[in-house]
Amino acid sequence: PLLLISADMNSFVVLVAVMASLVHSAPSYTPAWNGPLAAPVLLPSGYLADTSDVASLKAAHLAAVAAASVASGGFAGLYDDSPAAGSYPKWNGPLASPVVLPSGYLADTHEVAALRAAHAAAVAHSYH
């Protein structure tokens, strides 16, 4: 006998063990992406251009926002009796200037490239 318990209890223990092994089994196969590859278009300003479907959805959204603002009658203002003027922080750092590689990917900055090299060296060192 498996254990010195009843046959029903043995069946229950086996059932729980099988269920636990199914819950913690390896994940199922997920197929790779088979869709079209991205072909980013860089505008002269340095930004990535919208695709045609994004541009049409953006135009539809802006039209809906304009229609809603006309229908609402406008903003009547906000009463605020606080004695102090509010101020909000503003980004004063440099603007990003992305570099697109011939493959279409964005190039790493010098900082990211240095961190990648340090990480690769640490991983290589951990296997020795």
Image (cartoon, helix red, strand yellow):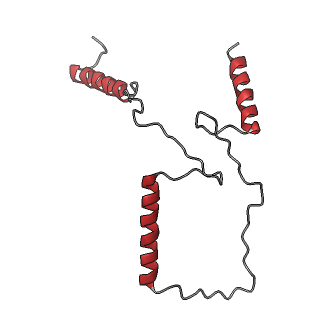
Q: Which one is nearer the viewer's eye here, 83 or 57?
A: 57
**Residue depicted at 59% across the width and 86% down the height:** 78
Residue furthest top as drawn: 1
Considering only vertical position in the picture, is 11 above or below 106?
above
Q: Is residue 17 left or right of residue 85?
A: left
Q: Which one is nearer the viewer's eye here, 6 or 78?
A: 78
Residue 34, given in percent of the width and then of the height, sits at 39, 32
Residue furthest front as drawn: 44
Considering only vertical position in the picture, is 109 above or below 127?
below
Q: How many marks?
A: 0
Q: Is residue 90 left or right of residue 52?
A: right
Quadrant position of residue 121: top right
Q: Which one is nearer the viewer's eye here, 81 or 68?
A: 68
Q: Is residue 83 left or right of residue 18?
A: right
Quadrant position of residue 56: bottom left
Residue 116, given in percent of the width and then of the height, sits at 70, 30
Q: Is residue 122 left or right of residue 36?
A: right
Residue 10, given in percent of the width and then of the height, sits at 26, 20
**Residue depicted at 24% across the width and 22% down the height:** 11
Residue furthest left as drawn: 8
**Residue depicted at 27% across the width and 10% down the height:** 1
The C terminus lies in quadrant: top right
**Residue depicted at 43% across the width and 77% down the height:** 68
